[in-house]
Amino acid sequence: MRVLVTGVAGFLGSHLADRLLAEGHEVVGLDNLITGNADNIGHLLGHELFSFFNHDVTQFLYVAGELDGVLHFASPASPVDYLNFPIQTLKVGSLGTHKALGLARAKNARFLLASTSEVYGDPAVHPQPETYWGNVNPVGPRGVYDEAKRFAEALTMAYHRYHGVETRIVRIFNTYGPRMRPDDGRVVSNFIVQALRGEPLTVYGDGSQTRSFCYVDDLVDGIYRLFLSDRIDPLNIGNPNEFTINQLAELVLEILESQSGVDHRPLPVNDPKVRRPDTTAASELLGWSPQIELRDGLLKTIAYFREVLDLDSART
């Protein structure tokens, strides 16, 4: 196949490009590098099946030649990013999705939308199945991301129903691994970077809120399987094993043998109290389940951050 990946220089987009290329597909990558990092795709720039264009997907979008797929991963995706870039987040979820869907329609290509567990908001149903409609504050600070993705899902389904575009929607739960930015504000990267620097780990609230952490290789495997499947409705991809934020902090400190301790801060507005995917559909339809345990994934992620932070491997 020949596919377009928007947001290709991001954490997930770059890993997805790796997987597509490993499967023998040609990848056209697109990114305006607002939150993406060119270093994430530096190893691909000489690949004969990879090409890159620095472009904003919310602007007129043209790709020469045939395309078999359009995988739309462009968006600020961490709380730090979408709070710093609220208008851009709304635009890429609306205008960017519209442009990407229009291209898929013009090329008769299959379209895959990278949505998010944030569409469930602060959920009143736990764990969250795909049939749950969510509990989202549309005017809260997180609403710029939540509603952008909810709109993107609605637009994707409208293009499927009205224009007959082949569409797929993946709802991505908390993911971690190499190529996360040290300053992206996600809890795994925050904890690892703070512990490596000997700083207290920032825990918001009392730390009893829960998250489910999926290693990036597992997530990409699920997304690739979904893209090749016949599933039209949104599909959860994430790790169904649930941990409190306190448990994650303890595990990071234990692995690094760190005495950093924790620093409790006020809980952010509309921060979800629980987050855990119901992955029954992914298991039954795709034969997919995550394979990497949290400890093993953290070890791989810590090794990456040691390198990017230029820290001696013996330091804790």
Image (tube, rainbow, N blue to C red):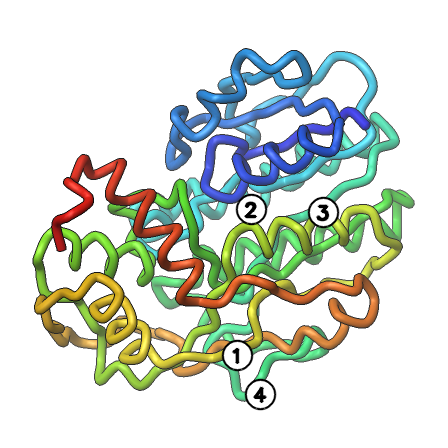
Residue under pointer 2: 93
Sooner in the amino-acid sequence: mark 4 or mark 3 = 4
Number of the front mark, 4 or 2? 4
* 268 relative to 188, above or below: below
* 272 relative to 229, above or below: below
Name the residue nearer the viewer: 256 or 84. Answer: 256
- Tag 3–tag 1 contact (CB < 8 Å): no
Which mark, residue 135?
1
Separation of residues labelled 4 and 3 (CA atoms): 28 Å
Query: What amino acid does circle 2 point to?
Result: Gly
Which mark, residue 2?
none
Residue under pointer 3: 224
Query: What amino acid does circle 1 point to?
Result: Asn
Separation of residues labelled 1 and 2 (CA atoms): 19 Å
Separation of residues labelled 4 and 1 (CA atoms): 9 Å
Query: What amino acid does circle 4 point to?
Result: Val
Within 10 angstroms of label 1, few (less than 14), some, or many (20 or more) residues?
Answer: some
Name the residue nearer the viewer: 1 or 4. Answer: 1
Sooner in the amino-acid sequence: mark 1 or mark 2 = 2
**Picture quadrant of residue 282:** bottom right
Separation of residues labelled 4 and 2 (CA atoms): 25 Å
**Residue 66 position within the rendered picture, expressed as x and y whole percent measured from the top left:** 83, 19
Number of the front mark, 4 or 1? 4
Query: What amino acid does circle 3 point to?
Result: Tyr
Which mark, residue 125?
4
SS for tag 3? helix
Q: Residue at x 63, y 40 (%)?
A: 72
Separation of residues labelled 3 and 1 (CA atoms): 29 Å
**Residue 311 position within the rendered picture, expressed as x and y whole percent measured from the top left:** 16, 40
